[in-house]
Amino acid sequence: MNKKNYDMMNWEEIEAVVYGDCKDPYEILGVKKKGKNKLLQCFYPGAESITAEFNVDGKNKKLKLEKVDDEGFFAEFFDFEYSSYILEIKYDDKTVKCHDPYEYEVKTDLNFEKNILKGESKNAYEYLGSHKKTYEGVSGYEFIVYAPNALSVSVIGDFNNWNENANLMKMDKLGFYSIFIPDLADNSQYKYVIKGKGFKGYKNDPFAKGIFDKNSVCKDVKVSKKKKTLSLKDDDLQILEVSLFDLLKKYDDKKKVLDYILESVKKNKYDTVSLLPVLKSSNDDIYQIMNGFSFDDETGLDYENFSYICENLSKEKIKVLVELPLAYVSDNESGLAFFDGSHLFENDDFRLNSHKKYNAMLFDYNKEFTKSYLYSSVDYFFKSFYIDGITVPNAGLMLYHDYNKNPGEYITEEWGNTINSSSVAFLKDINKYIHTTYKNAISVASIYAYFNNVTGKDKNSLGFDYCINSGATEELIEFLSLAPSYRRDHFDSFLVFTHFVNDQEKYIYPFSRKENTKYDASLLQRMPGDDVQKLANMKIAVIFKHLLKGSQLINSEVDTYNGTDDKNAKAFEDFYEDFRKIYLNAKELVKSTDGEPFKYKCIENQIITREYFDGSKHYVLVFNFSNDSYEEYKIPVSHEGVYKEVFNSDEKKYGGSNLLNKKAISTEEDIENGIYTLDIKVPNLSIVAFSYREYTDVELEEIYQKKKKKAFDYVNGETKKIKEKLDEDIKELKNQAQIKIKELELLLKPYDH
């Protein structure tokens, strides 16, 4: 290169490129006009030489570039016209042919970007992130990221040897950085290098659709523009909660995972599957997600496998819910926290932007970009997959500033209120959007705290369809742990606390993964008593929970009792399957109760009965919370008839002692108290269910004749007793009269002369 051309080069800008301090690399890289000539400049750190192969009227014309900076900056002037060119880059160990990224400048959409920055975008994922595109017939990936506080942003990956200055991005006037990298293959790994004042971060793409080996992954995801036809809502959902991470780890095949779920759903008659968080997390805590879009390609739970499972569950008419964290993300250094050297997604105040207990970055719902981000995450799942709804986990953390925080770690709002008003407004808005945009869509809040009006449609409600009531499980375990003498005093308050009868909220009562791993112990381990009593109490807990008015959720680990010995696992599995049949047959009766938790409470021996009756079907359930069994126990019932045991948790196959009521039992009439009673056997720590039927006409006639005979026998017997008593009394009176007469006659004895 001669001195004249050398002097025409902008060495200040070249230095900015080399050191990664350039906001618009397109101003210098690529082909630029320089007077009558053209100048091609490229920056490939580590390259030994670069040759440009130009297409000139269909012929190949080569131009070797001069290395003008030892860091890898190459340049050369030329004077011919061309239609396109390819770079041949030689390194020590390889030679690469590729198109020049700076030949194709991305035209950002300022109107779309303004909508995102107003907090009104619901589909920012269609614009931001990496997307497969074609520029001038050349295929590759386009990258757009929002980093308004950055001084420069570049893309690094396996395609540029992870050199942080190799692919600098261009910033537009709104703070969005962009670049198109041609020839980039699907599943290429990448990160953003974001530089600011005193800051340099290696960040994953907030909108990446996958993460592998801690890096974002380029994925050609086609998002459907059509709204899915969602399943109709149901008042009482029967939900199986599963972890696709665990199932894929166990079966290593998406079809086997699907088959397992379908088999479980069919066996215990669930109508809904709730999927635990499926997004990439920073550690073993599945709730510490990296962002709102990235699947974990490393575990096999990628976009394709997740889509396959959701679609096939939908084909089987099974509703699909997915847990989508909206409260926080991991504070991992490559995540969203302090993304561009500023608090882009979170509040500037540490008391509002982080949570020490969860190692989490908390979202700031006052920031418009954050709202667009979260709206888009929700919309992405509804539009891209066959799901029927979302569950928002850890909603309590969203609603309360002081949730699981210590003094000094939170703020209060007006009048010392700890409710997060911006979060409340956001949840109302997101639910309004979901229910307006997706007909029959379901939204669920998982909240381990009390908040008034979580569900419902009035203006004060958060707008969820269901609320997971985890507190009921804790109260149930605490109740079962009480000594029998204390249960008597705590039973009524326990029923009230667990919302046994509730018309204010639509609850889901769970035995979820969280509850089955709390305190590093399973639900079985948390039950009171020895091994035998733990299993018995676990069965009581399952049944008692099902009688709470609302929907039911159980984790697949609890459903199949994984983790216990084979004998107990089989006993519990048989018990659960048989009980579910009884429960679902009586489910409508549960809805039609008169509002009282129990018809009778026989608390003397901690035995409680509950009746369901709708005029034709009648069930009596008997709970024995004590450690004592009874060979004979009298319970009151409302209706005269025949009762047959249809379920007994003490059956031998369920791991019990087999104290059963093998024969049908007829009621007895307690005339004195005006009630009917049953004499039954009651095992300890058990639940026994009896079906009811009315007496047949023949039986009624037999009963009538027996009553008639009994009445006649009673009357005749009593009459006979009266007559016999009368005869005895007359005889006694005669004897007494004769004695008295004789005594009187003795008074006349002196007068015989």
Image (spheres, rainbow, N blue to C red):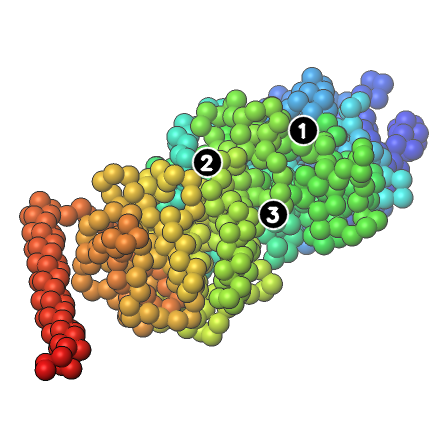
Q: Is residue 113 left or right of residue 137?
A: right
Q: Quadrant of the N terminus?
A: top right
Image location (x, y in percent) of residue 646: 25, 56
**Which residue is painted at 25% across and 47% down in the image?**
639
**Which residue is painted at 78% across and 41% down in the image?**
352
Circle 3 is placed at which residue position? 448
Nearest the camera: 104 or 418?
418
Q: CA distance from mark 2 to mark 3?
A: 25 Å
**Residue 688 vertical position relative to residue 126 in the rendered view, above or below:** below
Kindly identify which numbered label has been placed on residue 425. Answer: 1
Which secondary structure, mark 3?
loop
Q: Give the mark nearer the N terminus: 1 vs 3.
A: 1
Kindly identify which numbered label has been placed on residue 387. Answer: 2
Residue 183 in sight from this viewpoint: no
Image location (x, y in percent) of residue 138: 59, 29
**Which residue is painted at 41% across and 35% down in the image?**
235
Which secondary structure, mark 2?
loop
Nearest the camera: 672 or 516?
672
Mark closer to the observer (2, 1): 1
**Residue 512 vertical position relative to residue 630 in the rendered view, above or below:** above
- Which quarter of the figure has residue 625? bottom left
Image location (x, y in percent) of residue 731: 10, 71
Three-letter code, disc 3: Tyr
